[in-house]
Every structure is written in structure tokens, then in C-alpha cells.
Amino acid sequence: MKGRCAVTLLALLASGCITEAYCFSSCEDGVGGEPGDGGSGGEGGMGGGFSTSNFMPTGGMDCGDTSSSLENCGECGSICDLAGATPICLKGECLIQSCLEGQYDIDGLPETGCEYACPVLDTTVELCDGIDNDCDSLIDADDPELVTPTTLCNMTAGTPCELTQVVCNADSGWTCQYPPGVETIQGFISLTETLCDGIDGNCDGDLDEWFTALGDVCSDAALGQCKDYGVVVCDALNLNATTCNYAAPPAPGVVEAEACDGIDNDCNGFIDDALPDSAFEMALIVGGGGVSIDRFEASRPDSTAGLPGINEAVACSKPNAVPWTGGGFTEASQACAARGPSYRLCTLPESENACRSLADTNYPYGASYQATACNGVDAAPGAAVATGSTATCVTAENAFDLSGNVAEWTATQTNTPSAAPDRIFALAGGSYLSPEIGLACTIDLEPRALETTLLPNIGFRCCKDP
């Protein structure tokens, strides 16, 4: 009978019916007492529920202290178990007490636990090696704590290297990312520049210094005055080489007839070779039987109005040139003969006749002496002047300086015997040291000199047979 009642009681409880309850254990006053004793379920009571160690009075389970229980954290049945962590239930909230070895809490959210598994056993500062060294889930350049080296790359100010980027390339480590223009070999700056490009390719402060010919004078393969000169520059079509820039003046000359000027005018590679008769300015000697005489005192091919020149290959006859002086008789004779087989040193009579001209005057300019008409001692320059520069000292045939300026060797010997080097030859015309008596076309006692005499006031001029 009692068993049936128990079953009935349980059934009533399950159905939510309120009946009188009976206390089986741990009963307190007023709970499960006799009817009418004022206890719970008694007469006049609230109708108390069934209570055991596993059930709440309202019918739920009694799970104990939910503020610190890992099995019932915050509420019954809420297990505090966090991934990768040792959990703790604190005031009903499941928190991370500590992370397991190798696990890290990156996002700071307790519910995700120590969600990051770091492969590093011993953490260090972040390195550029493709590994999360400080276990913050950020690797290499993604980690703001990565320190970029400052001395690894050439970053010299004022050179192309100034803009170099230091780049972390994971497991290959730090590399230098040099800007365009910097020459590198397997990532390292080349010691020597290979490009001639106007850029300091090896960042040493010098431009294209390995191309040592830059700025030098260069020329093409032409000869003589046809040769073009330029400056060595970088070759825009081949940056590994240089080229000659011919754009700068002067422009090259063109092929011309050879002249007596120390220049290869006909561009054949030879200077003053096979000179034509037109290379020498000459005038016919009056009564000379067709013999011509130089209009100007002989000068060296490379002489100018200010310099006597040094080229002694052949004697020239040209204006505005310092006369050829300081040579002996033999030098003068050979310089005339170098023009060709019909050229020779003039005789004294030929020089006198040329000076007297068609009018047969005592001086090239006239019958009477004029102190400054020719370059004698009275004109007072005290030195030879450029040929033809004394415009008043000229004959009717336009032959200049047959009086004064420099005395001239002639082929007229004035002594015997005739063996060299003891021969003495007449000198024509007088010089810048001569007074009036020595400047006449014909001198009663003509000046003369030993053939080896070398003086700055003795020159010569050439004649040409017809």
C-alpha cells in the first residue's frame, strides 16, 4: 500500500499537482510536517515543492555554486573549457587563467581561449626570417616591432643610393632594393661602373669615372684639314661604350689645293707636299728674262703674324708672317729648292732689279729716301715685322720689303776660294738695323756674310726660273 502511495505521489508531482508532502530527510520545521502544523504544505501554507540535493524547489537541478564552478560556470551545465588554455570561472564568467605551452591569446577574447599556436619554443624580438619570433601572430615586415637595420645598405646622400629601400624577404633575410641607375651584381653594388650614362652607378660620388677618356679630344679617320675633331662622350646607343661627338665647332675643312701654310690642304696625309706654283706669291723681275721673285720675304709654313714657326720643310712666300731668320746660307738655299726644280735662291742683281722696279728708282717706293717708308733703323721698330705689314714699302709689281726689315741671303758669292764653309755671300736690301745708305736698292759696298752666319736680322727670298 505504501509503495503504491509513493508511486502516486511521484505521479502527482510530475503532473504539477500540489498535495501534502512528506519529508523523508533533512527536514526543517514547517516542511513536510503534519497537516495543520503551519509548515510548508500544512494547513494555511504555500504548498511547498519537492526538494533533494539534486533538485531545486521549483523543480530544476541544484548544481551548487555557479560563480566559480568549471562544470557549472554562471549556470548549470555551462562547462568552462577554453581551447589552448587553463580556464578559471570567476564570478560566473569563464576566463583564461593561463595559456598552455606554445599557445597564445592574440584576440583578447576569453571565449576563443588561447587560439594561436606559435611554433617558436623560445621567443625573441622579431627577426626577418619568415618566423613569428615574438609569437604575436605577426611575421617579419607585418610586425611593427621589426627593427630595420640602418647600416646594411649603401644609402649615401647625394647619390642614387640615397633612395635605397631596405626590404625583408622572409627566409632570405634582409635585402637592399636599390633604385634605378644603381649597378648591382647579385644584389651588391658593383665596384666599377659598367654603364656610361651620366649616373653615379656605384654611388661613390663620381660619375662614369671608369670611362677615363670622357672629355678627351677625339677625331675621325680623315686626314689633313678634312679631319673632324670632337669630344669623347657616352654613347647613347651603347651605354657600355663611348663615342666621339663631332657636333661642336669647328667644322672640318674640305679638300683644297695644297698651300704653303703647314696644313695638309688636299687631305692626303702629307703637309706642304708637291706644292703647286699657286702656293707661292711671286712677281716678275723687270728685265729679268722671265725670272720671278717672291713678293714677300721667305717665311716658315707654320709662321703667323706673331710667331716665326718651327716647320722648315719649305720656304713660303705669303703675307702677314714673321720672316724666316736665324738660318745660314745653306738652309736658305735648301728651303727654296724644296719648292721644286725651278726654284732657287735669288742672285744679288735679281734682288736689286726687283727693288728698282720698272721705274728704276733708288728705293722700292721711289727715287728719294723716306725714313719710315720701310722698316729701317729710322723707322725704329727695332725688330723684324710681319711680311707685307709695312704697306708703303712696296714696288710697282707689288713686291714688299725689298728694302729693310731683314737682309736677304743671295746666291752671289763675293770671295774665293769657293769651298764650304768659308764662302761669303752678298746680302740684299738691308734690315731693320740699316740706316739710309744701307736701305737703297743698289749699295756701292754691299753687305755680305760668311755662309754659316746665323743672325735674327738675316733672312732670304726665293726666285723661280721660267
Image (cartoon, rainbow, N blue to C red):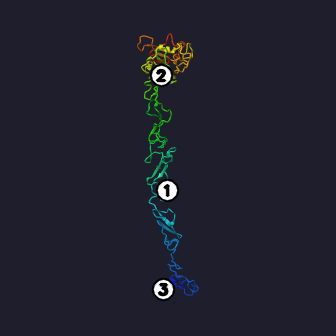
For the residues carrying marks 3 and 2, which lies nearer the camera in this image? Answer: 2
Which residue is most to the right?
Answer: 44
Identified at 48% across, 50% down, the residue is 166
Which residue is disc 2 drawn over? 280
- The mark that comes first in sequence, 3 or 2, is 3
Which residue is disc 3 drawn over? 7
Q: Secondary structure at mark 1?
A: helix
Q: Are marks 2 and 1 in contact (CB under 8 Å)?
A: no
Residue 88, placed above or below residue 174: below
Q: CA distance from mark 3 to mark 2?
A: 158 Å
Question: What type is the residue that disc 2 sits on?
Answer: Phe
In percent of width and height, residue 190 lies at 44, 44
Which residue is disc 1 drawn over? 142
Q: Secondary structure at mark 2?
A: loop
Identified at 48% across, 69% down, the residue is 81
335, 84: nearer the viewer: 335
Question: Is residue 428 visible to the viewer in this orientation of the structure?
Answer: no
404, 60: nearer the viewer: 404
Question: What type is the residue that disc 3 sits on?
Answer: Val
In percent of width and height, residue 59 lies at 52, 79
**Mark 2 residue crowding within 10 angstroms, few (<14) / some (14–19) / many (20+):** many
Q: CA distance from mark 2 to mark 1?
A: 89 Å
Question: What type is the residue that disc 1 sits on?
Answer: Asp
